[in-house]
Image (spheres, rainbow, N blue to C red):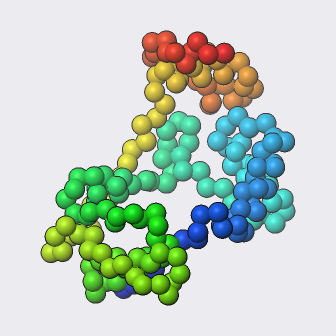
C-alpha cells in the first residue's frame, strides 16, 4: 500500500500438520525446563539458551524485564487498522484460507486461497474506501499494562515464600500499594 514491498506472500500450514524444526526445539526447552528451577525471566532465558547445549541453536530474546523495561516494542495493529473501523473490513472466514498474496499494484486487495496454492483464489478488497489508506508515519506502540495490584498482592502473599532469596524481590516484590484482597487470594 505504501510501496515498502512490491509483493508479499504468506503461507500457513494446515492445522494439525505443522510438525517442523521449531517443534523439536520447543520440545528441547520443555524437557530442560522440567529439570530446572525457574524463578525469573532471566532463568527462563538461560533454560532456553542451554536447552541445545554447546550448539546454541535456541537463542532467547526477552521482550521485557520484570521491572517493566520494554526491550521489544509491540504494536496494537488490530485497534489501529481494524477496530476503529476506519480503514479495513475483515476477511470473511479467514481461518479457512492458507495462502495470502498482496501486491503493491493493487493496494488493499488480498488474494486468498483455501488449501492448495493452485486452487481458485478469492480476490477481496480489504479497504472500505480504496482511495483512503492508513498513514505510514505513525506506529501504534502498545505499552504493557504491568501487573495489577491484586496480582502483585497474590504473588507477594502466596508465591514469594517459594522463591529463593535472590528471586523474591524480582518475581514477587512487595506491592506498589496495598491492593484489596481478591477471590484469588483465598485459593491455596
User: In the rendered image of this protein, does residue 37 appear above or below residue 74?
Assistant: above
Q: Residue at coordinates 70% horizontally, 34% vertically from top-left? A: 39
Q: Position of residue 171 (x, y in %)?
A: 62, 30
Q: Position of residue 24 (x, y in %)?
A: 76, 62
Q: Quadrant of the N terminus?
A: bottom left
Q: Is residue 55 visible?
A: yes
Of residues 181 and 65, which is closer to you in this image?
Answer: 181
Of residues 74 and 65, which is closer to you in this image?
Answer: 74
Q: Residue at coordinates 52% horizontally, 24% vertically from top-left? A: 151
Residue 9: image quadrant is bottom left
Q: Position of residue 80 (x, y in %)?
A: 28, 55
Q: Is residue 40 left or right of residue 151?
A: right
Q: Position of residue 127 (x, y in %)?
A: 23, 69
Q: Is residue 176 visible?
A: no
User: In the rendered image of this protein, does residue 170 appear above or below residue 91?
Assistant: above
Q: How many marks?
A: 0
Q: Residue at coordinates 70% horizontally, 69% vertically from top-left? A: 20
Of residues 7 and 54, which is closer to you in this image?
Answer: 7
User: In the rendered image of this protein, does residue 145 appear above or below residue 178?
Assistant: below
Residue 106: image quadrant is bottom left
Q: Is residue 57 left or right of residue 119?
A: right
Q: Quadrant of the C terminus?
A: top right
Q: Residue at coordinates 76% horizontally, 49% vertically from top-left? A: 30
Residue 136: image quadrant is bottom left
Q: Is residue 112 left or right of residue 65?
A: left
Q: Is residue 136 left or right of residue 68?
A: left
Amino acid at each position: 500500500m505504501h510501496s515498502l514491498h512490491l509483493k508479499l506472500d504468506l503461507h500457513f500450514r494446515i492445522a494439525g500438520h505443522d510438525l517442523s524444526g521449531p517443534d523439536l526445539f520447543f520440545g528441547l526447552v520443555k524437557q530442560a525446563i522440567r529439570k530446572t528451577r525457574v524463578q525469573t525471566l532471566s532463568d527462563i532465558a538461560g533454560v532456553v539458551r542451554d536447552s541445545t547445549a554447546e550448539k546454541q541453536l535456541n537463542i532467547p530474546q526477552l521482550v521485557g524485564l520484570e521491572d517493566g523495561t520494554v526491550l521489544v516494542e509491540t504494536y496494537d495493529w488490530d485497534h489501529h487498522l481494524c477496530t476503529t473501523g476506519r480503514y479495513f473490513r475483515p476477511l470473511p472466514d479467514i481461518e479457512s484460507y492458507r495462502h495470502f498474496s498482496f501486491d503493491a499494484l493493487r493496494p488493499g486487495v488480498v488474494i486468498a486461497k483455501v488449501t492448495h496454492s493452485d486452487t481458485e483464489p478469492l480476490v477481496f478488497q480489504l479497504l472500505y474506501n480504496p482511495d483512503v489508506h492508513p498513514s505510514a508515519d505513525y506506529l501504534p506502540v502498545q505499552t504493557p499494562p504491568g501487573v495489577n495490584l491484586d496480582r502483585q498482592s497474590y504473588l507477594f502473599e502466596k508465591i514469594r515464600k517459594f522463591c529463593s532469596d535472590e528471586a523474591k524481590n524480582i518475581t514477587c516484590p512487595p506491592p506498589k500499594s496495598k491492593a484489596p484482597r481478591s477471590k484469588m487470594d483465598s485459593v491455596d
